[in-house]
Image: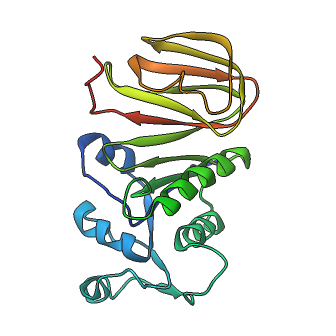
Amino acid sequence: MTRSNFTILLGGALTLTERLAAQLSGSRFIAADGGMRHAKMLGVVPELWVGDFDSTEEALFSDFAEVPREKYPAAKNATDGEMAVEAALSRGATSLIFAGALGGTRSDHAFLHLLRLAALAEEGHAAFMTSGEEEAYPLTPGTQEIDLPQGSLFSILGFTELEGLSIEGARYLLDDFKLPFGSSRTISNVAEGPVRLSLKFGRAVVLARPYDLSGA
């Protein structure tokens, strides 16, 4: 099956880095409300723009007048980002990148994005989030490898108790570890190159800072 990569532009912080540019290469784009402002920085024209447009700068409407819009009322049962995800999936998305999902002025939205990331992984969708300076990856039962620069910081935040957690390719290793819910044991680890993670039970996210070498 041909992979169809979609990037959802959200309203949080986004810094253009070489790593981000490489991650977005070849992607299709959908903007969610004020996330359209990132399109100018990235030099892309999204194929769709969705939302209630309550956080969109007026100038963007003329700058991207050619982009089809799907407008929704402010009083709705889903966020603009969630509607953008549904639009991407309906267009055959096989992997999703959320750009601008982390940080920003709304902590509730940022936390919801992390929960949504975990939910998408459980539904079988490949996805991760990025601000350019920080990245988030879902961690569900199984084994996965995250390609991180040597010396960069990463943390694992459990949404539940985690069982059978193993960490390889990092300064602080774990083998078949049981992590209590709310524990800080997996905060501020340091990548020694690509990090290999295994989990038997639970759900979590990995927050990584590929340009932060303060732990090295």
- Along the line of sight, the residue nearer the viewer: 76 or 45: 76
Location of residue 158 in the rendering, given as x and y in whole percent from the top left corner:
62, 35
Location of residue 6 in the rendering, given as x and y in whole percent from the top left corner:
50, 58
**Residue ID at (43%, 77%):** 33
Above or below: residue 215 compared with residue 83: above
**Residue ID at (51%, 62%):** 109
Colouring method of the image: rainbow
Above or below: residue 99 compared with residue 83: above
Q: Horizontally, is 83 left or right of 41 in the view?
A: right
Q: Horizontally, is 101 left or right of 179 in the view?
A: left
Location of residue 44 in the rendering, given as x and y in whole percent from the top left corner:
31, 66
- Tell me how many marks there are: 0
**Residue ID at (59%, 67%):** 82
- Along the line of sight, the residue nearer the viewer: 182 or 133: 182
Q: Horizontally, is 41 left or right of 93 in the view?
A: left
Residue 77 image-quadrant placement: bottom right
**Residue ID at (66%, 51%):** 120
Rendered-image quadrant of the C terminus = top left
Question: Is residue 94 in sight in this rendering?
Answer: no
Above or below: residue 35 compared with residue 131: below
Question: Is residue 15 in sight in this rendering?
Answer: yes
Above or below: residue 79 compared with residue 95: below
- Along the line of sight, the residue nearer the viewer: 123 or 89: 123
Q: Which residue extends farthest right? A: 201
Location of residue 138 in the rendering, given as x and y in whole percent from the top left corner:
59, 40
Residue 209 image-quadrant placement: top left
Q: Horizontally, is 55 left or right of 212 in the view?
A: right
